Amino acid sequence: MDDDLLFAIVTIIAGLLIAGAARVVVRWLEKFAETTETKWDDIIVAAIGTPVQVGIIAVSVYIALKFPGVVPGQYAWIISDKILNSIYTLIGTWIIASLVHDIISIYGHALAEQTEGDWDDRLVEFLELAARYIIWFAGIMLILVNLKIDITPFLAGAGIAGLAFALAAQDIISNFFGGAIITVDKPFKVGDRVKIDTFYGDVTNIGPRSTRLRTLDYQIVTIPNNKVTSSYIVNYSEPDVKIRITIPVSVAYGTDPARVKQVLLEIAGDAIKNTGYLLEEPAPTAFFQEFGDSGLKFILYVWAKKYNLPDEVKDAINQRIAARFAAEGIGIPFPQMEVRMKKE
């Protein structure tokens, strides 16, 4: 066997042995990294471990091919310095892509776990994928430049593709940033009862593209995030869950307004003591509002313990008003129309 070919084989075998030894060292480093509190050593070991082993084998093969007579003259380009530089660039790209991906994955998900919504988890997944593609694209472009290949068509194609993607995904991007604004500004959170535009219900999900409400009829309404950020939002859960309930009351003309107010407050006090719906503080208030077409109009304000009790509160108060007014002889008016006919 030719000495150069023998040296080439020995070089490749030596490379394989060195790569095997490197693999043993990497496994030991991985186990050691698991015993430390920081994640940086895990990230670094995971990023350089496999690429370095592959790089050792690739360089050993390259060196083996450099021995005279191993590679035929027509294939001499295989052992040019451009190929070696391309190998270095490929390994470096691999390491950087793995490093950035693991940093985003580990620390990004750690931050996302501190929030209630899942849009940031999806953002981390998107960044993981985007970072890896961008780094690999840059690395491949560097390799092509090193090989003296014109990359202008690739860049032009990438630019056109990026523009087309941006135009097609403008609503997605708008909704995505809307979700980010909702998370940062925190006008509401999952579980809050809100009114967004004309939709009223409980927030069940804040996603990267949309926010979902469950209405009081148990229907799910999906609202794009860019619509949410441009709409008026009423949050019934903030700053606390209590809510003021308005009870309109009308009585017949001739009724003493002071007595009506006193009775209304007594009714509210009875409801506070005998139902679990109302708060003592803030205290109920009653007002003589106006002279109506058919009677005197009053308003009773009471405070419910929670925003989801308006119907229960109105039922409890109105039943007591009907019973008490009947006992007190206070008439409740109804619309009346007087028609007079003139005889010619």
Image (cartoon, helix red, strand yellow):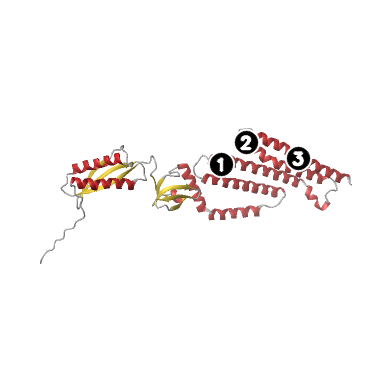
| Residue named by callout 1 | 109
Which callout, 3 or 1, points at the residue further toward the start of the chain? Answer: 3
Q: Residue 41: which quarter of the image?
A: top right
Image coordinates of residue 209 in percent, x first then y, are: 50, 50
The residue positioned 19% from the left and 42% from the top of the image is 259
Label 2 element class: helix
Label 1 element class: helix
The residue positioned 78% from the left and 47% from the top of the image is 80
| Mark 1 residue type | His
Which callout, 3 or 2, points at the residue further toward the start of the chain? Answer: 3
Image coordinates of residue 107 in percent, x first then y, are: 57, 39
Q: Which mark is residue 40?
A: 2
| Residue sitting at the far top | 36
Image coordinates of residue 223 in percent, x first then y, are: 45, 52
| Mark 2 residue type | Trp
| Residue sitting at the far left | 344
Which callout, 1 or 2, points at the residue further toward the start of the chain? Answer: 2
Q: Which mark is residue 213?
A: none
Q: Nearer the viewer, mark 3 or mark 2?
A: 3
Q: Is residue 178 left or right of residue 283?
A: right
Looking at the rendered structure, the number of numbered marks drawn on it comes to: 3
The residue positioned 73% from the left and 45% from the top of the image is 87
Count neighbours of disc 1 (C-alpha within 10 A) and say few if under 14, some if 14 to 19, many if 20 or more.
some
| Mark 3 residue type | Gly
Q: Is residue 26 left or right of residue 123?
A: right
| Residue named by callout 3 | 20
